[in-house]
Image (cartoon, grey):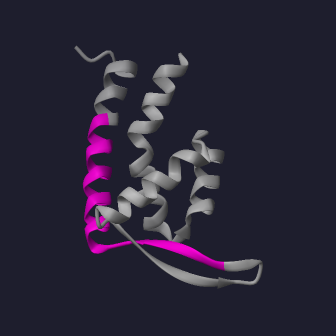
Amino acid sequence: MPEAIEIQLKKGALELCVLALLHHHDSYAYEIASRLSDLIGMGEGTIYPLMRRLQSDGLVETYLVESSAGPPRKYYRLTDTGKRSFESQKDAWSSFSGAVDQIVFGGAK
C-alpha cells in the first residue's frame, strides 16, 4: 500500500482506536501508545497530542495511580460523553467499512 494512503487510514481511525481501548479498560498513555504501535504501527508521538485533545473535548478524564516503578501514572478513562462518542464512531465505522468492503470485495454496483 502506498505509504501516504496507509498513514491517512491510520490517522482517520486513530481516535476510534483510542476510545475503543479505553472502552475496554482505563489505561495510561504509554500503554495505549504501545498497543497502537503493536497493532497498527502508530508512533508514540501521535498519541500524546490526541490524549490532550480528547481530554479538552471532554471525552476522557484522568486520575493518578501510584506506581512501584517511579512517579504516579496518569490514567485515562472515558467520560459519559466519551462513551457516547465511542458508540457513535463505532457505528459510523461499521457502516462505512461495511460499504467499502462491499465495494472492494463484493463487486457492488
Q: Main secondary structure of the magenta part?
A: helix
Residue 1 visible, this orientation: no
- Relative to 69, is 40 above or below? above
User: Which image quadrant for residue 29?
Assistant: bottom right
Is 35 positioned to the left or the right of 80 in the image? right
Residue with the most extreme right position: 69
| Residue 25 percent coordinates (x, y) | 50, 71
Quadrant housing the C terminus: top left
Q: Residue at x 40, y 50 (%)?
A: 15
Is 17 positioned to the left or the right of 68 in the image? left
27 or 47, nearer to the observer: 47
Q: Residue at x 25, y 64 (%)?
A: 84
Query: Is 78 contained in the magenta span?
Result: yes
Q: Residue at x 38, y 38 (%)?
A: 12
- Relative to 100, is 16 above or below? below
- Relative to 49, is 1 above or below? above
92 or 104, nearer to the observer: 92
What stretch of residues is rendered in magenta?
72-96
| Residue 75 percent coordinates (x, y) | 53, 74
| Residue 86 percent coordinates (x, y) | 32, 58
79 or 98, nearer to the observer: 79
Q: Residue at x 63, y 46 (%)?
A: 37
Query: Is 95 contained in the magenta span?
Result: yes
